[in-house]
Amino acid sequence: MQLKRKNSILVIIVVLLLIMTPLTILSIYLNFSNILKPSSIVKPSKEQENENKEEIVDNSRYKNGKLYFYDQDNNLLGEYTCQKDPCSYAVSTIDDSNYAIEYLDTKEVETNVYLNQYVFINDNDTINLYDINNNQILNTYKAIKNYNNMIDESYMIVENNDNKWGIIKLDNQVQTISDFNYDFIGLKDLIGNNNLIDTSNFIVKNGDLWGIIDNQGDLISNFLAGEITNYNDILISVKNNNIYYLYDYNGKRVVDENGFNYTSFTDKYINIIDKNNNLYIYDYVNDKKISSNMKIEGTDYKNSFESVLNSSTNTIDVTVNNKTYNYSL
């Protein structure tokens, strides 16, 4: 009787095990599956995501009364504490619009860190040239000009507190290329092979006279009466009382002493609009016209035509009133 009872209990235990084991396995499986469901994952809030992201990639130029300086790979170079909060990277002045110079009109942007060492900082109503490596202000300026980062980073046109302009060059040390002798310094609209504005020469104004200096600060033309608008290696275009004149570098007026309605340059060739509103291309070196007369309508001379040197066909291609003319050189 007792053996029979023990056998009954054993049977019950075996049955229970057979029932409970699948249920246990199923329960474990369901719990594990639920963990893997996206809805069960606790996501951070947007604020937490932004904070985490900011900690990883924050390379702000300004934050909490300080400026931060980075190289091209976003490695931190140094920092600067504002004297008068907030301070900022300086922005290029463009005063060329006050004159007749044909300049490149650029979109306003902050200046960069130059040569991983120098930065221009707008702080406390002045512009500081700051040396990151040595943590010191090297000089202060009233204004700076680099056509919104469109010239070689080594050069900067700078204005002192006496409203005079000069040129500095950034290298291992800051060099003065041109002292503060001029009322204006600017660059003509000419993009070089490096996709930056050419800095071989600079147009300068001294009182009522205008001239051209090279990038060593040496005067390479005579001073001229009237505003220099453009130049090539041979001639200089000057605007005086709305009349355009052509001068050589010795200051002699050439081609027509009575002047023109407009002049500009395509390489060594001259685009001339005479006083009858006729456009033609002139080769000064060989003293000859290389195009026929093309009638110009209106007085917006600069935008009334386009003249391009086509080296592949050795032609000047001139577009007037949506029609293009090709003239062999």
Image: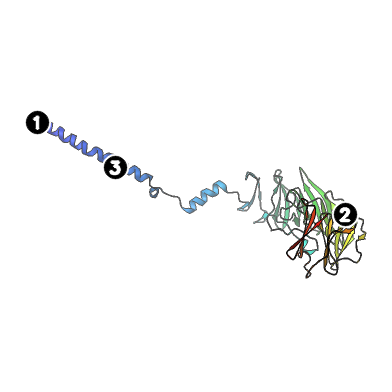
User: Which residue in the structure is indicated by mark 2?
Assistant: 234
Q: Residue 54, relative to residue 288: is it above or below?
A: above
Determine whether, in the image, residue 87 is placed left or right of residue 13: right
User: Foreground: 308 or 229?
Assistant: 308
In the picture, the quarter occupied by the N terminus is top left
Q: Residues within 10 Å of mark 2 (few under 14, many from 20)?
A: few
Residue 235 in the image: x percent, y percent?
Answer: 87, 57
Q: Tell me if residue 55 can be seen.
A: yes
User: Foreground: 273 or 168?
Assistant: 273
Residue 230 in the image: x percent, y percent?
Answer: 82, 58
Residue 187 in the image: x percent, y percent?
Answer: 79, 56
Q: Are marks 1 and 2 in contact (CB under 8 Å)?
A: no
Q: Quadrant of residue 253?
A: bottom right
Q: Residues within 10 Å of mark 1 (few under 14, many from 20)?
A: few
Q: Which residue is pictured at 55% across the width and 49% down the height? A: 54
Secondary structure type for disc 2: loop
In the picture, the quarter occupied by the C terminus is bottom right
Secondary structure type for disc 3: helix
- Residue 27 is labelled as 3
